[in-house]
Image (cartoon, rainbow, N blue to C red):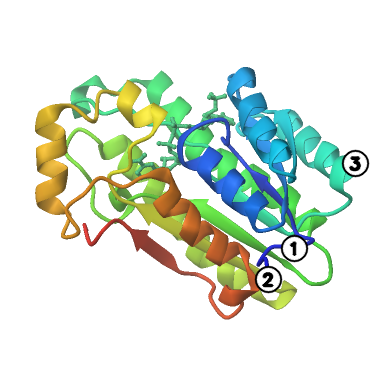
Amino acid sequence: MKTLTDKVAIVTGASKGIGAAIAKSFAREGAAVVVNYATSSSDADSVVAEITDAGGRAIAIQASVSEPCAVKRLFQETKEAFGKLDVLVNNAGVFKFEPFEAITVAEFQREFSTNVLGTILTIQEAIEQFGFEGGSVINLSSLAGSHSLPQGVLYSATKAAVESITQGLSAELGDRRIRVNAIAPGYTRSEGTVAEGLFGEESVKLYLSLTPLARIGEPVDIARVATFLASDASAWITGETIRVAGGAR
Ligand code: NDP
């Protein structure tokens, strides 16, 4: 029995990395999936093709999560395509690791607009669209959300905000049967982390030493837990941040 049959999900930032793995996992479990992306249309199309070739349902919709009009359009087009919404995954996220003195106003605005404002704007639209049965919101935090990293203080601050939004909103929206949870991945290989230079030889040695299960995380490790949080198997869980990090903290 598939766990997400008849559910409709939006996964933001699903053209790559963790988001792409979540979209594919949801579709395998029977959900119709919106593969949202900002700029990488061919990557999003490949994710959609992989899903539809396997008999699943998916469409790609371009929209930057930090732009209110684009977010409204994302949700309208989802409704037109699939008629309803059950699950929102706020996965779209950006990061840059650099010394504190190097942080610029532009980088502050880029990280907070995508990671925090984007999370707020999409949840506001989702609340409008979830039906009487409520819905499941899954926000991507990070180990950095509870343990600020040297040279990653700005990014850590955005993820701490995501965890605060998760906990506060779970209380505010519970009576509407809307569950709000977060996943805090550990060191996970993705297009973004590799491009940012976070998986050099020395870094990998460090991550392995900090990770009891002694390997690097893969996007599918995160996708499995997102699929659980989207499903009715997690119906009694809200307001939680679940570390998915091989034991790293
Ligand atoms: P990637 O950089 O590999 O992928 C990021 C995705 O987000 C892309 O699909 C990108 O789309 C999309 N995106 C970026 N900005 C926007 C925007 N404004 N609107 C819509 N989509 C956008 O990231 P990861 O897979 O590594 O990370 C995914 C999430 O997991 C992030 O929130 C990240 O902070 C979190 N995380 C990741 C960890 C890791 O080790 N990988 C560890 C802890 C947390 P496009 O390509 O079109 O620009």
53 vs 120: above or below: above
Q: Nearer the viewer, residue 106 or 148?
A: 148
Tell me which residue sits at (58%, 39%) in the image.
118
| Residue 80 circle label | 3
In space, the residues marked 3 and 1 are separated at their CA atoms by 19 Å
Of the residues shown, which amino acid type is indicated by label 3? Answer: Glu
Q: Dot 3, how many residues are within 10 Å of its Cα: few (below 14), some (14-19), or many (20+)?
A: few
Which image quarter: residue 66?
top right
Q: Nearer the viewer, residue 190 or 84?
A: 190
From the image, which quarter does the N terminus lie in?
bottom right
| Extreme-bottom residue of the structure | 236
Can I make out residue 76 in this image? yes
Asked whether the beta carbons under mark 2 and mark 1 sit within 8 Å of each other, the answer is yes
Give x and y (percent) for residue 212. 16, 60
Q: Are marks 3 and 1 in contact (CB under 8 Å)?
A: no
As drawn, the label of residue 170 is none
State the SS at label 3. helix
Is the C terminus in the top left, top right, bottom left or bottom right quadrant?
bottom left
Quarter-wise, where is residue 230 in the image?
bottom right
Residue 1 numbered mark, or none: 2
Q: Residues within 10 Å of mark 2 (few under 14, many from 20)?
A: few
User: Dot 1 corresponds to which residue?
Assistant: 5
- The picture places residue 115, in percent across and down from the top left corner, at 48, 39
Q: Residue at x 54, y 66 (%)?
A: 228
Give the residue displayed 33% in from the left and 31% down from the top: 193
Question: Which numbered disc flags the more N-terminal residue, 3 or 1?
Answer: 1
Residue 121 is situated, as x and y percent measured from the top left of the image, at 65, 43
